[in-house]
Amino acid sequence: MTPITAPAPPATPRAQLIHIETDRRLGHEWDEWDGKPLPNRGDFAAPARLFFGYAALTLAAALGLLAAVLFLLQPRLATLHPLVPRALWLALGAAGAVAWVWLAVLAAAFYSGRGLLPERLLERGPFLRLMNVTSFVSRAFGRRDWVEHAAIDVYNGLAARRKRTVGKGELLVLIPRCLSKQALDGVLAIAGRYEVPVFVATRGQLARRVIRERRPRAVVAVACERDMTTGLRDVAGKLPVLGLTMSLPNGPCRDAVLDLSVMERWVKSWVGA
C-alpha cells in the first residue's frame, strides 16, 4: 500500500518586491568614505539629548548670524527711517524668543510622551527644517551620523505617538537595495504577513516618485541616517512617515541590517492588526 503523505504546511507569505528606478545614485551621501571600517561597525545609535544639544547650538548660531548681519546693516537701514533698525531688532528678539520656546516645547513633548502641539507644528513642521540645518552644523564637528540618528529617533518618538491607522493597501514599506539577504527576507516576511507592498530603490531617492504614483496614506521607510534625513525632509511634511535606520557592519551601501522587531511593531500599529 502506498503511504499517504500529509500536505506540506503553507509557506509564510512574502510580500512582492517592486523595484523603482530613480534619479539619484545610491550611496552619494557616502562619496567621502575612505573604505575604512565605520565606527562601532556602522551603528550610530545616540541618545536624543545629542540632537537637542546640537539643535540648541544651531539655533544660537543662526540667531547670532542674523544679529551680526543686522548690526552691520544698521547704519544704512537708519537712513531709510530711524525706527527701522529698532523695529528689526525687536522682530529678531521676538523671533528668537519664539524659537527657544518652541525648542523647549519640542523637548518637553518628546520626553513627556505627550503631544503638546499639533504635528504640523512639531515633527511634520519646523522640526524637519531644524533637523536638516542641525545635520549641516554637526558635520563641522564630525558628529553627523550620530546627530542624525538622534534626530530621527526624536522624530519617530513624536510621530509614533499620534496613533494613526490606515488600511493595508494604504501603507508602503520603502527599503534600499543594500540590505543583507537575511534583513531583506525578514522585511518581506513582515510585509507579507500584513499584506503591505514593499518598494526597493535601485538608485537613490525614491520617495517622491513612489508616493506620487501609489498615493499612500502612510510610509515605513528604511535607510541609513544620511539618506533618512534627506527622505524625511522631502516626504514627512506631506504624509505620516516612520523612519527605521540601519546598521552598516560592512560599510555603506552593502549588507545593511535592521531591527526587524521594530519594523513589525510599526507596520502592525499602522494597519491596526
Image (cartoon, grey):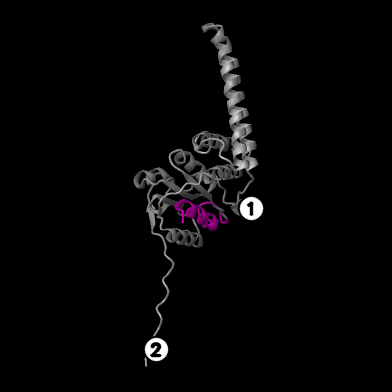
Residue furthest to the bottom? 1
Q: Quadrant of the N terminus?
A: bottom left
Rendering quarter of residue 12: bottom left
Q: Is residue 20 left or right of residue 227?
A: left
Give me the C-alpha separation between circle 1 and circle 2: 56 Å
Q: Earlier in the sequence, mark 1 or mark 2?
A: 2
Residue depicted at x 61% and y 44%: 146
The residue where tag 2 is placed is 3
- Amino acid at pointer 2: Pro
* Secondary-structure class at tag 2: loop
- Residue 142 seen in the current view: no
| Label at residue 163 | none
Q: Does any portion of residue 43 appear in the rendered image?
A: yes
Question: Magenta residues?
Answer: 249-273
Q: Which mark is residue 40?
A: 1
Residue 52 point in image, percent of width and height: 63, 37
